[in-house]
Image (cartoon, rainbow, N blue to C red):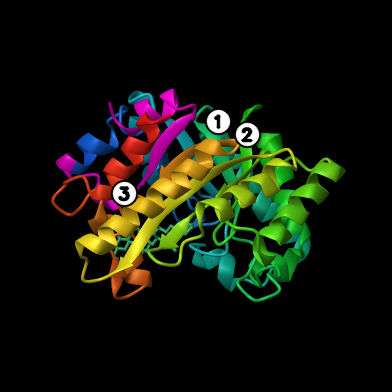
Amino acid sequence: PGLDVLAKRAGLLYFGTAIDNVVLDNKQYISIARNRSEFGQVTPANGQKWMYIEPTQGVFNYTLGDQITVPATRAGQLKRCHNFVWHNQLPEWLTSANWTKPALVKVLENHIKHEARHYYNDCYAWDVVNEAFDDDAAASLRKDIWLDTIGAEYIELAFKFARKYTRPGTKLYYNDYAIESVNNKSSKVAAMVKDFKKRGVPIDGVGLQAHYTVGRAPSYDAQMAAHKLFSRLGVETALTELDVRLQLPDNSTAQALQAQVYADSTKACLDADDCVGVTVWDFWDPVSWVPDTFPGYGNADIWDANFTKKPAYYAISDLLRSY
Ligand code: G3I
């Protein structure tokens, strides 16, 4: 049995993967990506992002998103939809104009309205707002076009629009990295969730991206504490973008450590009360985002370049079997 079959037996809702459009012509890749025994859930790594969906104001193009979601639906895979609002991969027309607050709020609502309706029946969850907190010591809100023009309110507006236009029952997530232990950033996110719950702003989940590095990943205990920080507030959690990069060149010691990190984080999700599933941020080393962003690092995924399952794959599989 593949990872999703084992994950479901162990009590999770899914084990999934991100898929990027650039590899859709690779038959070997696709035969794994669409294998529902391995992956019961799919996230478009890029296809649903603003620059592709609304490349010109008011003109919507769902081609890249559909290339991922339509075959996933056919294969019986759940979809986590990603994302409505982010500071990154925004179209030029949006970032280069001087918006007033009311005008940009309209742009935001219109975008969410169209995209939510197009994917109305598709999404188990939507990452409504992605990476709104910065990496400074205070974990302030990220200074981007949304904060600058609309103010902090843009986050709750996005969640309200998402609730208004998505299918009832769609899980609305806040998604971020470096919140997989209790720290300044996760505490800020928790404070936001608490405030939203108190004031009735719709939010159902917090996505812990879990982009890790061998030797620097949070321990099992640290990750458990993060799951608890959020589940205490009445939201579910998920590992939404799990990968574990290592310093190249690769060797068997690093691969064994990497396997341990994959297993520890999956175990934290399994043992946490409200963690619904694990998504790897692609499964095949050659398509990982890591080398472009962190030169000298890579091989972060669970299948190697030859499509051979790595120790990390077997560590996850063995762990799931033990539940
Ligand atoms: O589409 C073009 C293609 O036409 C061109 O040939 C190719 C040449 O490099 O570039 C393609 O665009 C790339 C795109 O991914 C699609 O593959 C962009 O250059 C590249 O910047 C973009 O990177 C994506 C990154 O987000 C952007 O910040 C990664 O694939 C994607 O995995 C990554 O995902 C993010 C999550 O959304 C949020 N959390 C962090 C995570 C990792 O950075």
Q: Quadrant of the N terminus?
A: top left
- Cβ of mark 3 under 8 Å from ligand 1: the answer is yes
Q: Is residue 285 left or right of residue 28?
A: right
The Cα–Cα distance between marks 1 and 3, rounded to whole angstroms, is: 21 Å
Residue 166 - label: 2
Q: Amino acid at mark 1?
A: Tyr
Residue 52 appears in view: yes
Count of numbered badges drawn on the protein: 3
Q: Which residues are magenta?
A: 1-28
Could you say where residue 207 lies in the image, as x and y percent from the top left? 57, 48
- Identify the secondary structure beneath mark 2: loop
Q: Are marks 2 and 1 in contact (CB under 8 Å)?
A: yes
Q: Is residue 205 left or right of residue 216?
A: right
Query: Disc 3 or 2, which lies upstream in sequence?
Result: 3
Residue 5 in the magenta stretch? The answer is: yes
Residue 120 - label: 1
Query: Disc 1 or 3, which lies upstream in sequence?
Result: 3
Residue positioned 52% across, 64% down in the render = 88
Residue positioned 47% across, 48% down in the render = 265
- Identify the secondary structure beneath mark 1: loop
Q: Nearer the viewer, residue 304 or 32?
A: 304
Residue positioned 51% across, 34% down in the render = 119
Could you say where residue 44 lies in the image, as x and y percent from the top left? 41, 45
Query: Disc 2 or 1, which lies upstream in sequence?
Result: 1
The residue furthest left is 306
The Cα–Cα distance between marks 2 and 1, rounded to whole angstroms, is: 6 Å
Instruction: Indicate whether 136 appears above or below 31.
Output: below
